[in-house]
Image (tube, rainbow, N blue to C red):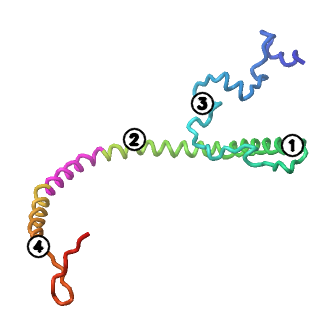
Amino acid sequence: NPKDEEKGCEEKPKKKCWWGKHKTEEEQRDDHISIGVDLVNRDEKGINEHVRFGFDDIFGEADTQHSWDCVWRLVFKVFTFTRLFVYRFCSLILGLPAAILFGILFAIVSVINVFACVPIAKLLSIPANWIAKTWSWLVHAIVDPLATALALLFSSFTIRKYGINSQPTDPCVA
């Protein structure tokens, strides 16, 4: 009865009540006005694409063997309903505690990052800058000249390879 559906909305009898109106997913996408949480595109960044499976991804009959159409439709409906029901039930049971747990963990890690890690990193960057400049000076002022002198000293040596009878062999040509 339309009158039974409109009892709660007596001021405007032509409109349905908001609780009686169920939109399909396509209608929700068409009306896509979202403030805050996006209830249509819940995985905008595609972080869970690896678990997106439909009926066609799981079940398929060979062209040579088909079950009765009513059985195939029933299998589709049972699979879809069971998957959706179990997912929603498990998300209710596991989702709320997980949201609380990860909300607490992300808050703690964020607070530690903001009030401990970043200030300590900024504090340590001051002596680290001094150490880097001192190390650079030591390498350029002491190690580089010593390495250059040793390289020049040992560059004048020639090495020859001798054969079995202590006679020089022909130079190796590559």
Decide if residue 138 is on the left or right side of residue 93.
left
**Residue 157 marker:** 4
Callout 1: few (<14), some (14-19), or many (20+) C-alpha neighbours within 10 Å? few
Q: First in sequence, mark 1 or 3: give its number.
A: 3
Instruction: State the residue position of label 1.
Output: 74
Cα separation between marks 1 and 2: 55 Å
Please name whichever residue, 135 or 98, is drawn nearer the observer in this view of the structure: 135
Cα separation between marks 2 and 3: 26 Å
Q: Secondary structure at mark 1?
A: helix
Mark nearer the viewer, 2 or 3: 3
Q: What is the quadrant of residue 143 in the picture?
A: bottom left
Q: First in sequence, mark 4 or 1: give its number.
A: 1
Q: Secondary structure at mark 3?
A: loop
The magenta span reads 122-139
Cα separation between marks 1 and 3: 34 Å
For image coordinates 22% across by 49% down, the residue present is 127
Decide if residue 2 is on the left or right side of residue 111.
right
